[in-house]
Image (cartoon, grey):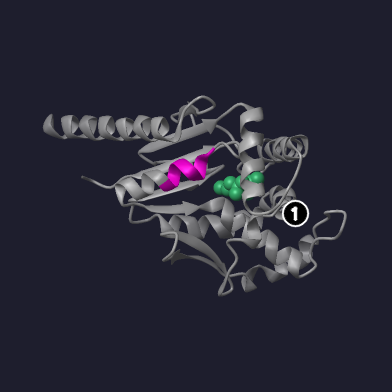
Amino acid sequence: MQKITIAIDGYSSCGKSTLAKALAFRLGYKYIDTGAMYRAVTLYALRHNLIDDAGIINHEELLKALPEIEIHFKLNPETHISDVILNEEDVEREIRTMKVSGLVSKVSAIKEVREKMVVLQRNMGKRKGVIMDGRDIGTHVFPKAELKLFMTADPEVRAKRRQDEYSSKGQYFSLEEVKHSLMQRDHEDINRKESPLIKAEDAIVLDNSELSREEQLDYVLKLISDLQFISREEQSHH
Ligand code: DC
């Protein structure tokens, strides 16, 4: 079957990466978590004291440091999923903290940071057979993706999922705290100037508040097989 590009965008903690990983596994595609890239830049900025205690970013110094920030993905043989590598260090764990989550939207709003990440993302996806999740994949990174999904879910459900994810890693927060952080992040992602979070016109909305993982996977696999059927039909008419 011909390989396609799948773009998954949507709000924070809607289960984009869970679905993307399951699809990648099933289809033998490459999964790219673009949020991890912005998180890695945020981690770099924190470690180099480019963000102060009040959350103010030293833009000038961060822009100067951009050429020093090298990000790529590397397959983790244990999880069979690619980990994000920041300057040769696997930072997959360090980027998933509440601290990084609270600052990443500010870092990802910076034009030059986005430009650098988008070049890398387009390069990683140029051979198709890729599933990329983020906020601007269907609108900006791959506007010609054959399949675009826009994911959403009830904020309560999302907060609970994220709280469980934190606690499974030994980080404990109240539901209110997690919900507040999610809402704050969505607000910043929707309202920024550079490639804000917005549904692409041709994206299919997937609200998974009441759907199991299997139901979501089946739904998307069906969309893909329909797409492939349509493209075969079109070819046979030419
Ligand atoms: O998907 P995530 O929660 O790991 O993403 C972290 C942040 O990175 C998110 O709040 C906004 C930003 N982001 C972005 O601006 N563009 C993307 N393509 C992916 C993430």
- The reply to whether the residue tagged 1 has its Cβ within 8 angstroms of ligand 1 is no
Q: Which of 93 and 230 is in front in this view?
A: 93
Q: Residue at x 55, y 75 (%)?
A: 88
Occupied quadrant, residue 214: top left
Where residue 164 sits in the image (x, y, percent)? Answer: 63, 42
Left or right of residue 209: residue 143: left
The amino acid beneath tag 1 is: Lys
How many numbered marks are there? 1
Few, some or many residues within 10 Å of mark 1 (<14, 14–19, 20+) = some
Magenta region: 15-21
User: What secondary structure prevails in the magenta region?
Assistant: helix
Above or below: residue 191 compared with residue 68: above
Question: Is residue 138 visible to us here?
Answer: no
The answer to whether residue 211 is visible is: yes
Q: Where is residue 113 in the image (x, y as percent from the top left)?
A: 64, 58
Question: Is 143 within the magenta?
Answer: no
Residue found 59% across the figure and 73% down from its top? 87
Q: Position of residue 182 (x, y in %)?
A: 70, 38
Q: Is residue 16 magenta?
A: yes
Q: Nearer the viewer, residue 162 or 33?
A: 162
- Residue 152's place in the image compared with 108, above or below, is above
Find residue 196 and report its horizontal and vertical position in percent: 63, 39
Work out whether 77 lies above or below 168. below
Which of 3 and 178 lies nearest the eye of the viewer?
178
Q: Tag 1, which secondary structure?
A: helix
Q: Which image quarter holds the C terminus?
A: top left
Say which residue label 1 marks: 99
Q: Quadrant of the N terminus?
A: top left
Q: Which residue is drawn at 51% across and 24% down?
A: 210
- Name the outermost residue toward the right: 54
